[in-house]
Image (spheres, rainbow, N blue to C red):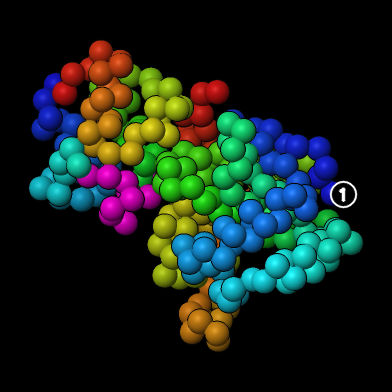
């Protein structure tokens, strides 16, 4: 199930995370602006990162990619908790360079990731879990077609609630169309 | 078109008061200008000025002043 072949859509390419990008990804992940949105906010050591990567190699329920735009690595996209029998997974992503964070690029990466999930893996439901105070992420997910569910998880470590969101393919395609029309590559 | 029209487009799309809009307003300086608002802004600009922006210009549109500069490429003076 591992997506070895790069997946290209909307001007971005998702390349499977390989060892040569581990330090780059660790550097992004440890930056305060990325870490503050993560469940685990502590510093990730090189050893921890390598152990995590080794674990990925034998785990079909998780896929991590580096997102590239115009030959430049710009962030990470992932599908975790992939359950083919239930047809579900939890997407995740972040964009690191400031100039690509607040425009159309996050949508390009999210759409590529969602397309992979729905088309290549044949999933039917994507689940997003967002800290309730992360207004930008809430707006982004809703713009992508996610609907909030009744499920909320309290994260003790951060004393904050995670609101669960759900996305099916029909809602995704309907939400994607008005934004994808601006992707003119 | 005047600056007032351009400023009004930004105020409406970002949901901020008109007084907060000037050429120096940059996307990473206010929380209202996130990726979702950016796409609302692009749609508003295309409708108002009757242009179809290249995707690279949509990405480069990082301030009000930069937007004005980009629109000149499409023969829009504002």
Q: Quick check: can you spot residue A142?
A: no
Picture quarter with the C terminus of chain A: top right
Residue at screen point 41% across, 70% down: A133
Residue A32 lies in the magenta stretch: no
Front in this rendered view, residue B43 or A106: A106
| Left or right: A165, with B74 as reference point | right
- Tell me the subunit letter for badge 1: A
| Left or right: A26, with A18 as reference point | left
Determine which quarter of the picture holds residue A119.
top right
Q: For the image shown, how many numbered marks are present on the structure?
A: 1
Determine which quarter of the picture holds residue A166.
bottom right
| Left or right: A39, with A124 as reference point | left
Front in this rendered view, residue B5 or B65: B65
Q: Is residue B44 above or below residue A154?
A: above
Residue at screen point 45% across, 27% down: B56
Residue at screen point 38% across, 50% down: B34
Determine which quarter of the picture holds residue A125.
bottom right
Residue B34 lies in the magenta stretch: yes
Q: Main secondary structure of the magenta part?
A: loop
Q: Pinpoint residue B74: horizontal percent, then vertical percent.
A: 30, 15
Q: Pinpoint residue A151: horizontal percent, then vertical percent.
A: 58, 73
Range covered by the magenta-colored residues: B25-36
| Left or right: B78, with B70 as reference point | left
Q: Dot 1 corresponds to which residue?
A: A1
């Amino acid at each position: 199930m591992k997506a070895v072949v790069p997946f290209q859509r909307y001007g971005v390419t998702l390349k499977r995370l390989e060892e040569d990008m581990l330090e780059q990804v660790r550097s992004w992940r440890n930056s305060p602006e990325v870490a503050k949105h993560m469940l685990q906010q502590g510093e990730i050591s090189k050893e921890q990162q390598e152990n995590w990567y080794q674990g990925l190699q034998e785990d079909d329920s998780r896929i991590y990619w580096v997102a590239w735009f115009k030959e430049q690595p710009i962030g990470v996209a992932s599908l975790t908790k992939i359950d083919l029998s239930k047809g579900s997974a939890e997407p995740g992503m972040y964009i690191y360079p400031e100039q690509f964070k607040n425009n159309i690029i996050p949508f390009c990466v999210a759409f590529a990731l969602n397309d992979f999930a729905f088309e290549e893996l044949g999933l039917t439901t994507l689940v997003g879990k967002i800290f309730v105070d992360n207004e930008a992420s809430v707006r982004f997910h809703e713009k992508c077609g996610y609907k909030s569910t009744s499920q909320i998880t309290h994260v003790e470590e951060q004393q904050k609630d995670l609101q669960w969101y759900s996305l099916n393919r029909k809602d995704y395609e309907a939400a994607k169309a008005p934004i994808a029309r601006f992707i003119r590559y | 078109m005047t600056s007032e029209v351009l400023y009004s487009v930004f105020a409406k799309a970002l949901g901020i008061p008109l007084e907060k809009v000037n050429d120096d307003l940059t996307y990473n300086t206010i929380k209202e200008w996130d990726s979702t608002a950016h796409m609302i802004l692009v749609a508003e600009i295309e409708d108002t000025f009757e242009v179809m922006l290249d995707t690279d210009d949509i990405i480069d549109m990082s301030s009000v002043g930069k937007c004005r500069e980009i629109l000149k490429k499409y023969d829009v003076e504002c």
